[in-house]
Amino acid sequence: MNIRKIRLGICLLLLALNLTGCKGNEMPLVIETETGRTQETETGISDSGIRQSDKQQTDEQVKTEIFIDVSGAVVNPGVYELPADARIYEAIERAGGLLPDADQDSLNQAEKLSDGQKIRVYTSAEAETMAIAGAPADPGAHSDSSIVNLNTADEAGLMTLPGIGEAKAKDIIAYRTEQGGFKSIEEIKNISGIKDAVFNKIKDKIVV
């Protein structure tokens, strides 16, 4: 009897033993092939299958999220967590949707969001007032008009306000960065040196 037949006989014997005596214990079956290599199989999932499954679960768990501040004419203003590829309309939906007096024309609801972005939904009356004043209705736009958005204006824009010099402009920018933006125009009084007297001069010239 040649070596090949002997090996075949051993393989068949081991297979029979595995099926009859080791079935309940789920013991691995070790088979010696003609090349001398061993192959191990199990009744459960193979090591490679487990590793692949773990990798898939890990990939599914790694999701990038962003935080968006939604304010203005929405049902539930606040900060919401959204997928990294979310659009403005999704942020509005998370905030409960638009109020009846919301000005939809001032929004590009298909615009893609970025982490930390603030969305201010203006009412129709606010948008009309800003249009008359020559200010952009888009909350992210910048203009040299008399209306200044406290959350988007740069230092030069803030300094166009009465009583706001370079130092206060820097303080305003620092404050909105630390606090995640102004929630109301009255909040500007939290800035050192800006009290009721200054606020009364600028309250009609600022928005958030």
Image (cartoon, rainbow, N blue to C red):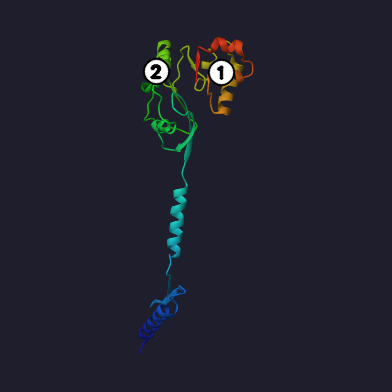
Q: Position of residue 168 (x, y in %)?
A: 60, 17
Q: Nearer the viewer, residue 185 or 63?
A: 185
Q: Earlier in the sequence, mark 1 or mark 2?
A: 2
Which amino acid type is marked by label 2? Ser
| Res 171 → quadrant | top right
Q: Position of residue 82 (x, y in %)?
A: 45, 37
Q: Nearer the viewer, residue 112 or 99?
A: 99
Crowdedness near tag 1: few (<14), some (14–19) or many (≥20) residues, C-alpha within 10 Å: some
| Res 88 → quadrant | top left
Query: Which residue does the image show at 56% across and 9% down from the upper left?
Result: 201
Q: Which residue is mark 1?
A: 186
Crowdedness near tag 2: few (<14), some (14–19) or many (≥20) residues, C-alpha within 10 Å: some
Query: Which residue does the image show at 43% across and 57% down from the upper left?
Result: 53
Q: Position of residue 159 (x, y in %)?
A: 55, 14
Check the image and name the residue furthest to the right. Answer: 192
Q: In the rendered image, which quarter contains the N terminus? A: bottom left
Which amino acid type is marked by label 1? Glu
Q: Secondary structure at mark 1?
A: helix
Q: Position of residue 30 (x, y in %)?
A: 44, 75
Q: Which residue is mark 2?
A: 124
Q: Secondary structure at mark 2?
A: helix
Q: Please state if 165 lies on the left or on the right of 148 as rendered.
A: right
User: Can you say whether 10 is above or below 135 in the image?
Assistant: below
Separation of marks 1 and 2 at Cα, in angstroms? 21 Å
